[in-house]
Image (cartoon, rainbow, N blue to C red):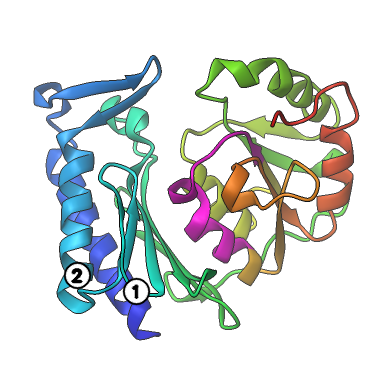
Amino acid sequence: MHPLVNIAVSAARAAGNHILRHAERVESLQIERKTHNDFVSQVDRGAEMEIVRLIHKAYPDHAILAEESGEQAGSEVRWIIDPLDGTTNFLHRIPHYAVSIGIEVRGRLEHGVIYAPSTNDLYVATRGSGAMLNNRRLRCSNTRELDDALIGTGVPLDDRFMPDYLPMLGNVATSTAGIRRAGSAALDLAYVAAGRLDGFFEFNLKPWDIAAGIVLVQEATGVVRSLRPDSEVLVDGHILAANNRLIEPLAQRLLSGPATPPQ
């Protein structure tokens, strides 16, 4: 395993242990509302502090982009961190959430680690070396037809995106085997990499939601792109991921109605 990935795995597991220590007493947590349907607690912040501490212990000059503490300048290596993706699930004791750590080197995503503490599932990917789940190599599904595909999605947190999202949801719901909205974009992307989902789309995600998952999907022979033509998905956050057979038909179906991703 690459040295950076070793640290990412250690940090993700440490954060996961922190999360699990609080999982059965969520009623005692101090919860803040970032928007009307986006929450943060001291568990998110504590998990993030644990991750950053371990990274800076090993690499004190590396840059950090983290959901709760923001950006810290540093070297040409940048760690992109979501300490608890799926906070709302966690707060409702739904055991579907994850720690997500992506690593950029000179502006290019090179490594991704996603750890689901409630199931002890560890997803790891390094560019050019493939993707693994608990030391088992991952490949995206081989589903060929949209009619047979199971697609993941996430409802936009920002209501301004609803007029664009709802037609897309209808387009896909009527032409696939089903839609799943599980509440963690990081795990949705990990599931695409593992072949559990055939594709995934969502609007307006942040880099920490998707950085690790992008590497996982790409290294599992899948494709990740922006829903907006000629845009970078890590910049705009309008993400579409699928196996290489479904990426074009799924994109065409999503964009077959009046909706286009907003600027």
- Residue 56, image x and y in percent? 19, 70
Residue 46 position, x and y percent, is 15, 46
Q: Nearer the viewer, mark 1 or mark 2?
A: 1
The kind of residue tagged 2 is His
Q: Residue drawn 15% across and 50% down?
A: 18
Q: Is residue 151 left or right of residue 93?
A: right
The x and y percentages for residue 258 are 87, 21
Q: Nearer the viewer, residue 71 or 238?
A: 71
Magenta residue span: 201-217
The crowd level at tag 1 (other Cα within 10 Å; few <14, some 14-19, many 20+) is few
The magenta stretch spans residue 214 = yes
Q: Which mark is residue 75?
A: 1
- The residue carrying pointer 2 sits among few (fewer than 14), some (14 to 19) or many (20 or more) residues within 10 Å by Cα, namely few
Q: Is 237 rendered above or below residue 104?
A: above
Is any atom of residue 124 visible in this view? no
Residue bearing mark 2 = 56
Please state if 173 lies on the left or on the right of 235 as rendered.
right
85 lies above or below 242? above
Q: Residue at x 14, y 21 (%)?
A: 27
* Position of residue 248 measured from the top left corner of the image (x, y, whole percent): 87, 50
User: SS for tag 1?
Assistant: loop
Q: Is residue 253 visible?
A: yes
Q: Is residue 129 magenta?
A: no
* Quadrant of the drawing holding the N terminus: bottom left
Residue 180 image-quadrant placement: top right
Q: Residue at x 62, y 53 (%)?
A: 192
SS at mark 2 in the image: helix
The residues tagged by marks 1 and 2 sit, at their Cα atoms, a distance apart of 12 Å
Q: Main secondary structure of the magenta part?
A: helix
Name the residue located 12 percent from the left edge and 30 percent from the top edge: 25
Is 231 placed left or right of 185 in the picture? right
